[in-house]
């Protein structure tokens, strides 16, 4: 599969191997390292969290335990669950789950900040060389994300697209037209920017322009950074608990406004290449400013 990189002036191209993971990072991996941080924003999803953590553990623990000959090995992973000021039993449930799942790290926001800000908070707290995102409502299958890990070599990012949406008709239609309009305006071919199943380098995640609603534009913003992107189909399941936090107002009108801002950002990237650097000497300069003692002697 050829990578999506519409702007050939971006450097570098697709990665051929993973970024180096800091050897001193703490984590559940056998060598004490973390390769991947799975960031999960959650608001009032207490009922779904036990199943979600169990599915993530079942999908990713085998990747840590397998031998290098069996595939793209995962040195270690963590689940950064960002509690977006939930008003249900989410804090208590997370405390209980942390005993069973040592990979779990929870962050509680001081007030409800929304999905984009919660994801940004998770990116900043993440310790992995790569970050991934999942929804907490169980509509995403963590097994798809684990499959993406094996598809990463040769690419900078893997983005999912929902082959069959298990949502109401109106939501599916809005999403379909939003993707068509977005691609037409931005001149891209990303199939499903609303799909939360994605994985890309943390270093790139921290460079992305962030704003309320930016999580719907991660694909275009990754292209803006010059990333080689692979798109893969993923499953989509009916929501078993709770209610959706989205409506026609915050899925369509706001997205249209954001789209014009992203179109502006896409046309004004900052590109540069450093030709060389010089090493600054640690020795004091002969022309350094005189000390207070010298000044006193000169005045005397």
Image (cartoon, rainbow, N blue to C red):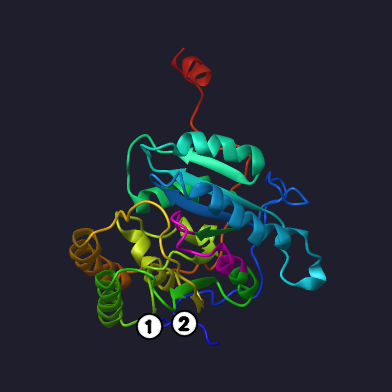
Of the pair 218 and 6, the residue shown nearer to us: 218
Q: Is residue 177 left or right of residue 15?
A: left
Element type where label 1 sits in the image: loop
The answer to whether residue 141 is magenta is yes
Q: Residues within 10 Å of mark 2 (few under 14, many from 20)?
A: some
Q: Is residue 259 left or right of residue 119?
A: left
**Residue occupying the point 39% across, 70% down:** 166
**Residue occupying the point 27% across, 73% down:** 169
Quarter of the image for residue 248 reads bottom left
Mark seen at residue 4:
2
Q: Quadrant of the N terminus?
A: bottom right
Q: Where residue 14 appears, x then y in whole percent?
A: 56, 77
Of the pair 158 and 53, the residue shown nearer to us: 53
Q: Where residue 109 appears, x then y in whole percent?
A: 40, 38
**Residue occupying the point 51% across, 38% down:** 93
- Asked whether the beta carbons under mark 2 and mark 1 sit within 8 Å of each other, the answer is yes
Marks 2, 1: nearer the viewer: 1
Element type where label 2 sits in the image: loop
State which tag comes first along the sequence, 2 or 1. 2
The answer to whether residue 46 is magenta is no
Tell me the chief SS of the magenta region: loop
Point out the stretch of residues depicted in magenta.
134-146
Mark seen at residue 189:
1
Residue 15 in the image: above or below residue 8? above
Residue 153 in the image: above or below residue 218? below
Of the pair 205 and 145, the residue shown nearer to us: 145
């Amino acid at each position: 599969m050829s990578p999506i990189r519409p702007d050939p002036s971006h450097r570098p191209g697709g990665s051929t191997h993973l970024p180096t993971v800091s050897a001193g990072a703490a984590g559940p991996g056998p060598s004490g390292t973390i390769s991947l941080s799975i960031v999960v924003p959650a608001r009032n999803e207490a009922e779904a969290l036990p199943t979600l953590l169990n599915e993530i553990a079942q999908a990713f623990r085998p990747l840590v335990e397998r031998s290098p000959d069996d595939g793209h090995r995962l040195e270690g992973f963590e689940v950064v669950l960002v509690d977006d000021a939930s008003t249900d039993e989410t804090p208590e449930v997370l405390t209980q789950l942390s005993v069973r799942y040592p990979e779990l790290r929870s962050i509680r926001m001081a007030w409800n900040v929304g999905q984009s800000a919660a994801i940004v908070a998770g990116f900043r707290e993440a310790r992995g060389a790569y970050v991934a995102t999942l929804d907490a409502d169980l509509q995403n299958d963590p097994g798809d994300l684990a499959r993406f890990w094996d598809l990463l070599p040769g690419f900078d990012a893997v983005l999912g697209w929902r082959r069959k949406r298990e949502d109401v008709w109106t939501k599916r239609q809005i999403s379909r037209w939003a993707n068509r309009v977005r691609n037409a305006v931005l001149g891209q071919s990303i199939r499903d920017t609303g799909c939360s199943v994605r994985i890309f380098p943390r270093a790139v995640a921290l460079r992305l322009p962030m704003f309320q609603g930016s999580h719907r534009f991660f694909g275009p913003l990754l292209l803006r950074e010059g990333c080689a992107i692979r798109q893969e189909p993923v499953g989509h399941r009916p929501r078993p608990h709770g209610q959706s936090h989205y409506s026609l107002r915050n899925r369509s009108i706001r997205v249209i406004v954001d789209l014009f801002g992203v179109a502006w950002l896409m046309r004004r990237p900052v590109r540069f290449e450093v030709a060389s650097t010089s090493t600054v000497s640690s020795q004091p300069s002969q022309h350094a400013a005189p000390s207070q003692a010298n000044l006193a002697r000169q005045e005397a």
